[in-house]
Every structure is written in C-alpha cells, then in structure tokens.
Image (cartoon, helix red, strand yellow):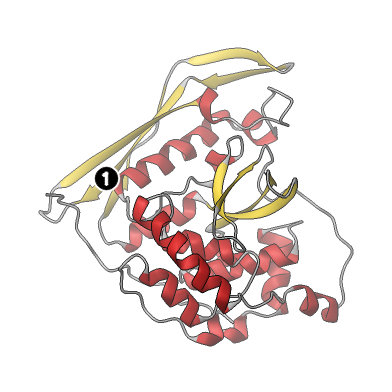
Amino acid sequence: MSQLARVEPKNTIPSLSASENDLNLIHVLENSVYPGAARESIMVAIDYCRAAKLDPLQKPVHIVPMWDDRLKRMRDVIMPGINLYRIQADRSGCYAGVSEPEFGPDVEENLGGVKITYPAWCKVTVKRRLATGEIAEFSAKEMWKENYATKSKDSLAPNKMWGRRPYAQLVKCAESQALRKAFPEISAQPAATETVTVPIEVIDPETGEIVTIHSVCEPEPARPEPVATKATVMEQQVLPEYPAESLEENLPKWRDLIESGRKTADAIIASVQRHARLSAEQIEKIRALAGQDFEEIPAEQVA
C-alpha cells in the first residue's frame, strides 16, 4: 500500500478577484512576465492561474508557441513551468527539499555548426515526507541530448537558451521529472523546458479528442505588436462561452482520458480555456469526472 500522504493543498496564494483581472494586470504581464505574447494567450494564462489559485506574476506557467498538426499552423499553448511544480509540492505540506544537481562528464560537440560543451546527464533528487514521517527520495536522471531544444526543426544547433545555459536548462528538466515522481498527484504534463523539441498531446475543445502539437521554439518569443487602445484590448480579451452541448458531448471522452491517466481534469480545463470560457458549473462537471472533491470557484472568477 502506498505510503504517500494525502494532504489538502495549502492555498496560501489567494485566487484573483474579478477586479484584479483588468487592463493593469494585462499590461504588467505583457511588459514584464510575458513580453511579446498575444493578449488572448495572456488572458488564458490568467484564467489558468485563477482556477489553480496561483499568482500569475510569479510565472507558474509559460506561453509556448507550437505547431498544430491538425490546423497546420502555430498556436500558443499554456505549459506548466518548474515554478508551478515547486509551488504544488510545497502546498502539499510534504515537500522536504531537493538535492544539489549531479552532472555527468562534459561532452564537446559540434551541433549544426555550433561548438558547445554540455553535461552528458544531470541527476536531481527530490525528498518527500511520507505519512509515516519517513523521508523518501525520488531521483531523476536526464540526458542532455534527449532534452535540448534546437533553433528550428531543420537544425541540430541548440537554441539560444540551451546554447548559453546548457547546465542550468538540464537541471530544470531533471528537477521537473523528480518532482513528478515524488508528487505524482501534481501533474503528468511535462514542463515547458522539457517540451520545446518533442510533440505533446492537448485537448481539441471542439471535438474533445487529443491532438498532437510540436514545437522547436523558445517560450514567449518576442512578437512585437503595435500599442493598442483600451477599447481594442478589451475586445481582444473576450473569449466565447463554451457551448453546453459541446460539453455534454465531450464529457464521456474526457472521462476516458482521465481514467486512462493520459490527462488530468485540470489539464483538460486548461486546454479548453485556451479557446473558450468555462462557467463554474462546467468546470465542476469536468473535475467531477475524476471523482475528486474541489472547492467551488465563484462564477465571477471564471466568466
């Protein structure tokens, strides 16, 4: 029998109230946290944080442009960051710390015309306090060649971040994996650092099916836009309400995804809210598919 303690999350960061979801918050996120990101994507990130009772100014999630195989175009995807995993682990009340990273031997290689020195691997250990009071250790070892992000799909050269910080980037990948092993209840979705070179699966809000998307881009690349007027910003931040008939049609498909372990209820909610607004009742129905009890979210926080 598992010794993992089930502890209710400590919601030390209050959810955003409707009054805080205004142009001032969007302006701050646009200029300091998500520079260059589309306003619609920033609004989705705000909704994601509100639903999970997170502070968007701490950047718990990333806005990552990815290639959609079905739509044949790039689109933004909200991805968890390592800060989100750390916050969720701490809220559990069972987090007991993390080790200093261990690195494998240095490797010198020419990748796509770029000469780089990188660690062969990195190992990180996360500690969790069990229900018995004992401290268990969960280690993850990640290989640099399996994680680094390329400049483009046609190049082997590392992108700017992985070329400049080959050690630090791999540490985040190893720590993210270790946190998921130690706290499997927090998420099954890879962090943004781990997914910029590999395909991931997201929910199509129209069909309820899983679709595959790809990315070789860095999170939140600069995409200069002209300064919009207040009226324009207000028009762009409004998303349509998610149709009730679509929800009822997709609930059985999402139940299968949750029961199979391919997606969590929160992951489905985040995917749908990229395109449409979910009401408090709709969110409750999706979360009920997992057979879990969640604190009710006031309608003004999700509409």
Residue 285 drawn at (x, y percent): 42, 75
Residue carrying label 1: 127
Visible residue check, residue 105: yes
Mark 1, Cα crowd under 10 Å, few <14 / some 14-19 / many 20+, is: many
| 180 to the left or right of 73 | left
Question: The residue tagged with tag 1: helix, strand or loop?
Answer: strand
Residue 296 drawn at (x, y percent): 40, 81
In this view, 171 is above or below 224 = above
Q: Residue at x 48, y 19 (%)?
A: 120
| Nearer to us in this view, 77 or 123 | 77
Visible residue check, residue 55: no
Q: Residue at x 53, y 31 (%)?
A: 147
| Quarter of the view holding residue 149 | top right
Look at label 1 and name its amino acid.
Lys
Residue 250 drawn at (x, y percent): 51, 65
| Nearer to us in this view, 135 or 203 | 203
| 57 to the left or right of 112 | left
| Nearer to us in this view, 301 or 22 | 301
In this view, 134 is above or below 242 = above
Q: Residue at x 68, y 22 (%)?
A: 156
